[in-house]
Amino acid sequence: MKALIQRVASARLSVDGKEISSIGAGLVVYLGVAKGDDEVTAEAIASKISRMRIFADERGKLNYSVKDKGYEILLVSQFTLCAECARGNRPDFTGAEAASRAEILYEYTGNVLEGLGVKVSYGVFGADMTIEQVNSGPVTIDLEIPYPERKA
């Protein structure tokens, strides 16, 4: 499972010009579900995201998590994070999980985050979404949690 995490001052997600979700300060998390990912992988990535210390304290050190600050997450499904680009010029998406299974794990990841005490807003799985975000920092983290059969 892969996540691209961006610290934001605010973000807004719309589909066909209609606003679906918006958050204030927090994180936009683009989540890619790879073949072989499972609930254990989802729990691990959600736990890591909720605890990742990427918000500054009064001295400017990154000492607070999204949970510590009471901020929100906008969770966006993005299978393109699973692209393989080593060969040729066209990304290969065969490493992405099938949509039906990926949607279950995307929603499960959000539910785990909520269970950990983080407020989560969602995108629309499989939709062509427009996301407007005001990045803060900028702070962008590329996180991958391999499923158990893979070795990190």
Image (cartoon, rainbow, N blue to C red):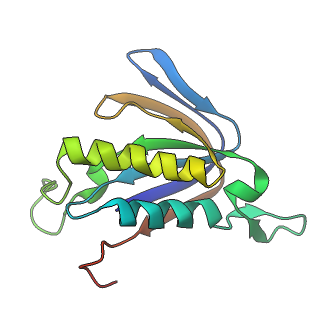
Residue at the spot x=40%, y=60% of the render?
42
Q: Position of residue 134 (x, y in %)?
A: 63, 40
Q: Quadrant of the N terminus?
A: bottom left
Q: Position of residue 128 (x, y in %)?
A: 31, 28
Q: Is residue 47 above or below residue 16?
A: below
Q: Which of the pair 143/100 is nearer the observer?
A: 100
Q: Position of residue 88 (x, y in %)?
A: 9, 62
Residue 70 seen anywhere in this rendered image of the structure: yes
**Furthest residue toward bottom:** 151
Q: Quadrant of the C terminus?
A: bottom left
Residue at the spot x=27%, y=48% of the render?
102
Seen in the image, is 71 located left or right of residue 18? right
Residue 29 seen anywhere in this rendered image of the structure: no
Q: Position of residue 66 (x, y in %)?
A: 68, 55
**Furthest residue toward left:** 88
Q: Which of the pair 37/39 is nearer the observer?
A: 39
Residue at the spot x=69%, y=36% of the render?
24
Give the number of callouts.
0
Q: Which of the pair 24/39 is nearer the observer?
A: 39
Q: Is residue 129 above or below residue 26?
A: above
Seen in the image, is 119 located left or right of residue 107? right
Residue at the spot x=39%, y=51% of the render?
31
Quadrant of the rendered structure where residue 36 is? Answer: bottom left
**Furthest residue toward right:** 58
Seen in the image, is 5 located left or right of residue 32? right
